[in-house]
Amino acid sequence: GAVVSQHPSWVICKSGTSVKIECRSLDFQATTMFWYRQFPKQSLMLMATSNEGSKATYEQGVEKDKFLINHASLTLSTLTVTSAHPEDSSFYICSAGTLAKNIQYFGAGTRLSVL
Amino acid sequence: EDQVTQSPEALRLQEGESSSLNCSYTVSGLRGLFWYRQDPGKGPEFLFTLYSAGEEKEKERLKATLTKKESFLHITAPKPEDSATYLCAVQGTSGSRLTFGEGTQLTVNP
């Protein structure tokens, strides 16, 4: 149980285009979903926290208009990187949790390369 | 501000050579301390949650312990498949966010 699916696993895009990443909890309802960014040889940095049906809470320094987060249902959250630039290239990982069980389960991550 | 420091940064062991990884933390009210395993190019895989000092949890060759200031992940007779980066994270009572350490990259040679 507690499977989180993230798609796509790898995406290459041109500078200026937008990219959408999906995060789904497959066998449980996620009251909260989290989006992280990870640079090589570094740890996970929280970008934002989203609760189903409400606006996401962004960490300091994360641009809301650039990283659009939608948490439309208890099993799906999306992260859209708008007008991507090479400096946005990174490994993006989502996680999902529930109030009942205070554990975050992670997706497999999405490698974004912006040319 | 919650802080997590892991040591060592990297650890090389021979198969069967037991050792421990350290996670030192400061948090304003501990709600939980979490250990995850991360393989290259993958998301973290949940291992353990510890909630209070003195608590211990075991899973196969891994055992996690917790004090008021630090946590240890003991690896007994490791195998090459235990090679991964081990991440420690804390969650304070103020919210649901996790603060991660930089991780310990473990390599177990056959």
Image: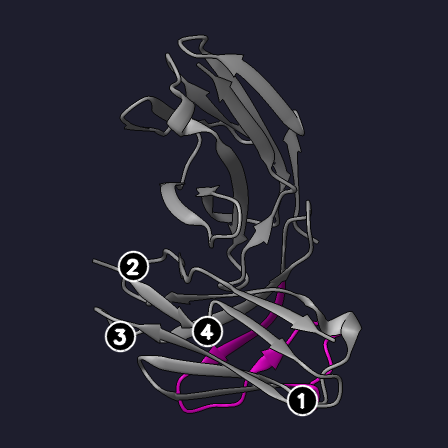
Q: Which residue is mark 1?
A: A82
Q: Position of residue A79 (x, y in %)?
A: 54, 81
Kindly identify which numbered label has been placed on residue A29.
Answer: 3
Helix, strand or loop for disc 1: loop
Q: Which residue occupies 62% across, 43% down?
A: B101
Q: Position of residue A90 (x, y in %)?
A: 66, 64
Helix, strand or loop for disc 2: loop
Disc 3 residue crowd, few under 14, some 14–19, many 20+, Cα 10 Å: some
Which of the marked residues, 3 or 2, is nearer the chain's N terminus? 3
Which of the marked residues, 1 or 3, is nearer the chain's N terminus? 3
Disc 2 residue crowd, few under 14, some 14–19, many 20+, Cα 10 Å: few
Residues indicated by labels 1 and 3 sit on the same polypeptide chain: yes
**How far is the residue under mark 4 from the one under mark 2?**
27 Å
Which of the marked residues, 4 or 2, is nearer the chain's N terminus? 4
Residues indicated by labels 4 and 1 sit on the same polypeptide chain: yes
* Residue interval drawn in magenta: A46-67
Q: Chain of mark 3?
A: A
Q: Which residue is mark 4?
A: A8
Q: Which residue is mark 2?
A: A101
Q: Which residue occupies 41% across, 28% down?
A: B82
